[in-house]
Structures are given as C-alpha cells and as structure tokens.
Image: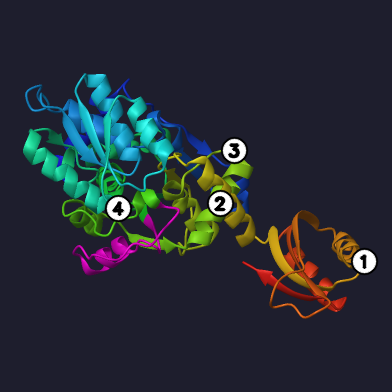
C-alpha cells in the first residue's frame, strides 16, 4: 500500500492542470431526506465525462517515450476508451481501441472524436479484450489496462485526495465497485490520510463478482446480466485490485436495476446532474438504505455521466415506473359508444393524467362485444397509483397493471 500511496501523490502532480479538480457538491435536499450531511463527488463533470481519464493519463505520462513509440492499445466499452483516446491525443501517440460490437454508436463516435482508431470486435468486453491483447503482441503497442494496474489505480486515487482536501472531516465514502481500480486507488489514499473513514463499495446485483470475491478474499468469476451500470459490469475483479480492496474496504453492498434507474431519475430532477448507471449506484445505495448504520458526513462518488439518449429514455420510464409515477394499465371495455370516454372520466376523477392510449378491438383473447385498452398514465407516486387502481376496480373495470 505504501508504494501505491507514493504513486498516488506522484499522480496528483502529474495530472495537475491536465484533469479537472471536480466539485464536491453538498446536497441540501438529500441531506434533509436521509438525515445526514451528504455530498457528491462529481466525476461526471470530468473531462471525457468520467474518472477514467485520471488512470489512463497517469499511466501513459509515466511511460518513457520509447515504450509508447508504437502507440497504445486497450479494450473498453466506453469510458476507459475515451480516457485513453484523449490521453493519446494529448501526448501525440497512436491509440487503437477495441470495443465490443454491441457498443452504442455514440460511444464509438466519442472515442473516434478524440483521434483514436476504433475496432469493433466480439460480443462483450472479454472478447474485445482478448483481441486487443493479441494485437498488443503483434504490434508492440503498449496495453493500457482499464483497472488492474498500479499506475491506473494511482490516477484514480487522486479523487480521494481532492475529497479530503475539501472535506478533511468526512466520515463515509461510497464508491462504485467494478474491476476495482477506482475503489482500490481511493481506499489506499483514504486509509493513509484518514484511517477511520468508513469505505463502502457498491455494485449492481446484475454483476455481483466484487461482493462474492470480497467475501472470499480471492477473485470469483460471476455471470453478468444486462445492467444500467455497464461501466462496472465485470465478470472478475482484478488480481491486483482485489487484495487491496479486501484489506482496506469495510464492505461491499449491492443495488437492483430499478433502484439504479430511480437514482438516475431522482438526480436529474433534484440536482440537474446527469449520472450514468455505474456512477448512480452510490446514490441508489443511500436512497434505498442498502448501507446499515450510515451516519455522519458522507460523500457519494459519481464516477461518470456518459449515458446515451436512448438509454436515458428507457431509464426515465423505468425510474418513473419503479417510483410509482408512471402506470401502465390494460383495461377491458364493452365495445359500445362512450365506453372509452367514461373510462377517461374516471381516470380524470382521481387526478391521473393520460400519457398514451391504444384501443384494440381485434385481439383474439377478447370475447365478442369487448375491446381492450392499453393506457399509460402519469401519477404522483405509489400511493396515488394504488388509489387509481382501486378506484377503477371499484367502478367495475376489469384491469391489470403492466410493469407495476
């Protein structure tokens, strides 16, 4: 740990004026709501939109010119790719980035905009990484690991130095946990300078390898499902990161997809901050009380804000559904004039707002003389949602909630 801490202090000097010292923002709303002083470390406002630039740039600026003469190479589905591409452009070296074929086009274009060559290979990160490693052997380019490297960890650890510089009396630091580069680097700095700080890592239940590995003290490969927190969705933590995390971190907690979606939507509404799923897991853990006994001045690390427009639309809908503010109903009506108008009147009577309606007379499952209405409603929350459903049932409607 001592060696890593030296690297972190060196990284601070190396990165000075090259990366943004991001704001640590106090949230009055969330502090009052959850009964503790709550701050946000906003790496979503960092250059390239993520903390990843710190590790990539620190690693590359620590190399000799000869070692990067053949360029750099890496694999990534987004944030690390942009960090490496930006750093390579800054240093004037060639960068080749291997990205999965499923990478959203906007992330591919963002990486290319920084001057990197992007190669789409494989169905997931592991396949893209294998291709990048093979290309490394063939070309002599220097591989920049997304997390399992001491210089990369050191770059990420500079975030902890900034937090302690702004708030030396911090009690709890809540950090996203994926491969482990961010939480390992930050934990080393925190234990060195503020040994009594409670350090909590957060991962998605859809990518649960870190908690199981933390519990066993050795890397445990776990299957990864589709998750909003794709930036921390790894099958296996790093061989270098895990021993540090096991030694320095107090606990790892998990959050569900609906909780992540609610956190993203809530942060948009309440703070006007756009935080991607991998960063919003920390807020989700606080909002849904996944951390037992959380007391005192606390900071959630928002690791990035790179989220594409299509995903935002999906997330908003899921977040509103999970919060009970968006209700989808299937209603069976008599196929008579005025039946739809009567349904709309009953919905208006309980102050719900019709967002979308689809009237279907041709479903095979319908009896003759019946019609089916699929209707999307905006509501005020879970209590109002229950009121709407109860009122319609009491008025004799045969309804079923979809996605509620």
Q: Quick one: label 3 or label 4, which is nearer the N terminus? A: 4
Residue with the mark numbered 2: 314
Q: Which numbered mark, 1 or 4, is in the foreground of this view?
A: 1
Asked if labels 2 and 3 touch by Cβ distance under 8 angstroms, the answer is no
Disc 1, SS: loop
Badge 3: how crowded within 10 Å, few (<14), some, or many (20+)?
Answer: few
Residue 211 falls inside the magenta stretch: yes
Give how far across and how far down residue 135 sits, in percent. Answer: 13, 40
Give how far across and how far down residue 174 sits, in percent. Answer: 41, 51
Gap between marks 3 and 2 measured at Cα:
18 Å
Residue 353 lies left or right of residue 273; in this view the side is right
Q: Quick one: label 1 or label 4, which is nearer the N terminus? A: 4
Badge 2: how crowded within 10 Å, few (<14), some, or many (20+)?
Answer: few
Residue 196 visible from this viewpoint: yes
Give how far across and how far down residue 352 sits, in percent. Answer: 81, 58
Gap between marks 1 and 3 measured at Cα:
45 Å
Q: Residue 337 has which mark?
A: 1
Residue at point 29% right, 39% down? 156
Furthest-bottom residue in view?
A: 367
Disc 3, SS: loop
Residue 190 lies left or right of residue 145; in this view the side is right
Per the rendered image, the range of residues in magenta is: 201-229
Q: Which numbered mark, 3 or 4, is in the foreground of this view?
A: 4
Gap between marks 3 and 4 measured at Cα:
32 Å
The quadrant where residue 304 appears: top left
Residue with the mark numbered 4: 124
Q: Quick one: label 1 or label 3, which is nearer the N terminus? A: 3
Residue with the mark numbered 3: 272
């Amino acid at each position: 740990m001592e060696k890593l801490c030296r690297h972190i202090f060196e990284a601070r000097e190396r990165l000075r004026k090259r990366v943004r010292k991001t704001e640590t923002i106090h949230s009055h709303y969330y502090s009052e709501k959850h009964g503790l002083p709550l701050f946000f470390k906003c790496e979503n406002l960092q250059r390239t939109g993520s903390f990843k630039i710190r590790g990539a740039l620190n690693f590359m600026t620590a190399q000799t010119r000869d070692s990067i003469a053949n360029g750099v190479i890496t694999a990534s589905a987004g944030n690390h790719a942009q960090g490496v591409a930006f750093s390579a452009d800054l240093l004037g070296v060639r960068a080749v980035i291997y990205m999965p074929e499923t990478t959203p086009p906007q992330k591919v274009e963002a990486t290319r905009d920084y001057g990197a060559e992007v190669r789409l290979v494989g169905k997931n990160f592991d396949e893209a990484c294998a291709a990048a490693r093979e290309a490394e052997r063939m070309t002599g380019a220097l591989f920049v690991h997304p997390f399992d490297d001491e210089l990369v960890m050191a770059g990420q650890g500079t975030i902890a130095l900034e937090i302690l510089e702004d708030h030396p009396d911090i009690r709890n630091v809540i950090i996203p946990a994926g491969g482990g580069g961010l939480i390992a680097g930050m934990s080393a700095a925190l234990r060195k300078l503020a040994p009594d700080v409670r350090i909590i890592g957060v991962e998605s239940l859809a990518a649960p390898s870190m908690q199981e590995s933390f519990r066993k003290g050795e890397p445990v490969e776990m299957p990864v499902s589709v998750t909003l927190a794709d930036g921390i969705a790894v099958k296996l933590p790093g061989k270098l990161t895990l021993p540090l995390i096991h030694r320095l971190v107090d606990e790892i907690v998990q959050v569900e997809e609906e909780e992540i979606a609610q956190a993203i939507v809530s942060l948009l509404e309440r703070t006007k901050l756009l935080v991607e799923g991998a960063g919003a897991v920390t807020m989700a853990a606080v909002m849904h009380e996944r951390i037992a006994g959380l007391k005192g001045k606390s900071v959630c690390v928002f690791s990035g804000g790179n989220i594409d427009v299509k995903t935002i639309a999906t997330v908003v809908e899921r977040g509103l559904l999970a919060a009970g503010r968006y209700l989808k109903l299937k209603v069976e009506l008599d196929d008579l004039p005025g039946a739809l108008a009567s349904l709309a009147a009953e919905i208006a009577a309980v102050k719900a707002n019709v967002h979308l309606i689809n009237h279907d007379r041709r479903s095979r499952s319908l009896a003759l003389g019946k019609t089916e209405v699929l209707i999307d409603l905006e509501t005020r929350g879970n209590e109002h949602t229950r009121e709407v459903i109860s009122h319609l049932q009491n008025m004799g409607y045969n309804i079923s909630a979809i996605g509620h």
